[in-house]
Image (spheres, grey):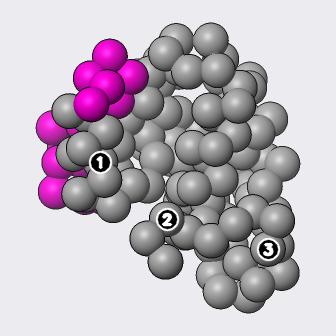
Amino acid sequence: MVNADDVRRTALALPDTTEKLAWSMPTFRVAGKMFVTLPEEETSIAVRCPKLERDELVLAEPDKFWIADHEASFAWVRVRLKAIDQEELSDILADSWRQAAPPRLLESHPELGVPAGE
């Protein structure tokens, strides 16, 4: 199980990432573009996720992934922190970072891999 401090540390370790308070919650951005939020009293995170993949995740692992009503029309998914470990957190945040990062950062950091679906 991971906590909000793990999310913060892992997100801020990704290149060009900053933390900004928005909507009364911590958000993390790459080159100014949001890729993770820490809502729900810091018991879950919201990350970028293509809608088709998001729907498959929620169906496959509903105890881990869910969709907030107000995010249903957007390409975001929620992840319960109590349901993941540090390795999975790192993978989830890196995937969300890749979806938000500009091409120059993706090219500069090939160690972070290629976005899913490319």
Using the image, determine if residue 76 lies above or below residue 112: above
Q: Secondary structure at mark 3?
A: helix
Residue 54 is labelled as 1
- The residue type indicated by label 1 comes to Arg
Residue at image position (76%, 84%) is: 107
Label 2 is placed on what type of residue? Answer: Ala
Question: Which mark is on residue 105?
Answer: none
Residue at point 23% right, 57% down?
Answer: 52
Check if mark 1's residue and mark 2's residue have beta carbons within 8 Å.
no
Q: x%, y% of residue 44?
A: 46, 24
Around disc 1, counting alpha carbons within 10 Å, would you say few (fewer than 14), some (14 to 19), or many (20 or more)? some
Q: Which mark is residue 116?
A: 2
- Amino acid under disc 3: Pro
Q: Splitting the image into 4 quarters, where does residue 111 fall?
A: bottom right
Residues at badges 1 and 3 in contact (C-beta under 8 Å)? no
Residue 86 position in % (x across, y down) = 71, 26
- Reading the image, the residue beneath label 3 is 110
**Which of the marked residues, 1 or 2, is nearer the chain's N terminus?**
1
Residue 33 visible in the picture: no
**Residue at position x 37%, y 35% from top?**
78
Q: Are marks 3 and 2 in contact (CB under 8 Å)?
A: no
Asked if residue 44 lies in the magenta stretch, the reply is no
Horizontal side, residue 112 vs residue 50: left or right: right
In whole angstroms, how far apart are the C-alphas of marks 1 and 2? 12 Å
Q: Give the distance between the C-alpha atoms of the residues marked 1 and 3, in whole angstroms.
A: 24 Å
On screen, residue 57 above or below 117: above
Extent of the magenta region: 60-75
- Residue 83 point in image, percent of width and height: 49, 15
